[in-house]
Amino acid sequence: MNNPLSILQQVFGYERFRGPQAEIVGHVIAGGDALVLMPTGGGKSLCYQIPAIARQRAGQGVTLVVSPLIALMHDQVGALHEAGVEAAFLNSALSYEEAVAVERRLARGELTLLYAAPERVTTPRFLEQLDALHRRGQLALFAIDEAHCVSQWGHDFRPEYRALTVLHERFAGVPRVALTATADALTRADIVERLQLQQARQFVSSFDRPNIRYRIAEKKEPAAQLLRFIQHEHEGDCGIVYCQTRKRVEETAQSLSAHGVPALPYHAGLDAELRQHHQDRFLREEGLVMVATIAFGMGIDKPDVRFVAHLDMPKNIEGYYQETGRAGRDGLPAQAWMLYGLQDVVNQRRMIDESPAGEEFKQVMRGKLDALLALAEATDCRRERLLGYFGERSQPCGNCDNCLAPPQLWDGTDAARKLLSTVYRVQQMSGIGFGAGHVMDILRGRKTEKVAQFGHEQVSTFGLGAEFSEAQLRGVLRQLVALGALAVDAQAYNTLRLTDGSRAVLRGEQPVRLRESVAQASGGRKRREARGSSALPAAAAGLTEAGQARFAALKAWRGEVARSHNLPAYVIFHDATLAAIAALGPSSVEELEGISGIGARKLEAYGQEVLRVVASS
């Protein structure tokens, strides 16, 4: 009963380990340090939960899990309780009396896992409690979740994570496992250095999420494009929409709601209680769309998120990968959909340039932004590019927009040279810089009021680009900014100016090849049939009519249980488990035993009720 596979089967109800889980679990149980990189939905938590159970059963005490989010602690502890594991958390959500009760249980050795935030872990009082456990040989393991937060190169840097080096310095004999879903080589090296994991074994899983379809389109009318995407392809589905600003979050949530899409806003400017209420609703209800800034998402374990949309370009590929990874955790088809435009590039570069950080940091951040822009502008397989960024080689996936509908390319070198010439000539003529719209108007020969005001119809390039559409020229401008051949001066009303990199393009030494502009971000797909709120999830799509009736009844029963336990429904049973029960139509507890996701404790707690629901449906 104490070997890892038995714990997996008896406690968690899974028949076998996935990928490198078995090797990681065995290494950590044996007392080895580990750095684990595993994509969202890959089963990272089992890599420390099973060692925690095994080491506790062997008399080695409690496992401390360092976790950055209160909501994540609550749901993970709730899920462990459902599986029959003694776990607790210490955070600001507890009253003084509740916190003292947890500390007493900790001192008595009654806990297998204790979750706490890094700010609490590094306080003198908490470290003294750990000292007491360590002296008694009752400190089994340290698990540092979301470990990328320790790195200044990571996308969710939290300075308080840096203080976790005290765990190694003060409790050198206690094994440590650091886990994250997202870290490029630079971030990975920083994690190792900051957490002193130089001797730790590194386990790097594939970053590939084959069930996610990646799609990136030019931003034209973002609100209308998003609405089309949801209505045509994800009506009734749960999803997340990321926006860069609080204002856009509010406007987008209101717009979706006004068009019949149930949507909630989430950003740091909302009252904490309202934010928590919205997050709880998202986790517990079906078919909701959360519109949020990046303040939302870390630790969101909801398995049935069918799409993640970005209305603004993120800062880097790590952030993009982490955020899109919240789709399709159940392994069923999901989409990562992003809009981007020239203004996104301008905004992100301005934030880097105006930050108080040192020049070395800014250079790294510019490089990361350039990598994301290259992914957006790519004409080859998105997945190949994405995985290549993390050092993983792959083949064309056949499941991204570029693979499914290869884009038409055009040579934008001539347009690029004419644009740069226009920027140069209007500045020479007027002594000041001008924005992208005005420069494009001149090149296309448009006699606007502003062109007339400054006499720019006299510029030698006036009308020389009449054959280019505005969309084409905007694509060229994005590419020039990405190449560093053109700069946008944020201090002077986003005016354009030449750089040292302009020369190579002007001389024809630097070709500029671009994808044809695609205005239809939804891909022109036929609108699917509208689904009611009672529609069956993808997990139940293959069931017979009788099986679907059983599934619907099981889902309703699960909802009642989840509400009574104040937990998300998926913590009780995943949709896949309900679908397996519905397909089998069991009539005895013995038949339930082999179904994935039903451990011994859940079988005891819910077995008879499940059989009753199946029999009556």
Image (cartoon, helix red, strand yellow):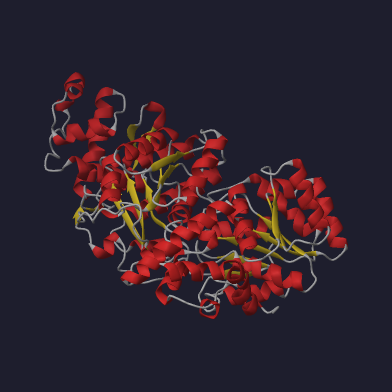
Q: Is 596 left or right of 307, judged from the image as shown? A: right
Q: Is 536 left or right of 87, judged from the image as shown? A: left
Tell how many labels: 0
Q: Please give the name of the residue rendered at 69% of the width and 46% of the height, measured from the top-left corner.
A: 91
Look at the image and tell me in which quarter the C terminus lies.
bottom left
Q: In which quarter of the image is residue 21?
A: bottom right
| Foreground of the two, 534 or 385 | 534
Percent position (x, y) of residue 151?
Answer: 60, 52
- Does residue 550 appear in the picture of this structure? yes
Residue positioned most to the front: 616
- Does residue 145 appear in the picture of this structure? no
Percent position (x, y) of residue 565?
Answer: 59, 54
Compared with 8, 233 (above or below) is above
Q: Please give the name of the residue rendered at 16% of the width and 32% of the height, measured from the top-left corner.
A: 460
Q: In which quarter of the image is residue 145?
A: bottom right
| Foreground of the two, 311 or 275 | 275
| Foreground of the two, 405 or 414 | 405
Compared with 172, 284 (above or below) is above
Percent position (x, y) of residue 225?
Answer: 27, 45
Compared with 393, 181 (above or below) is above
Look at the image and tell me in which quarter the N terminus lies.
bottom right
Q: In which quarter of the image is residue 276?
A: top right
Q: Is 62 left or right of 422, judged from the image as shown? A: right
Percent position (x, y) of residue 371?
Answer: 41, 54
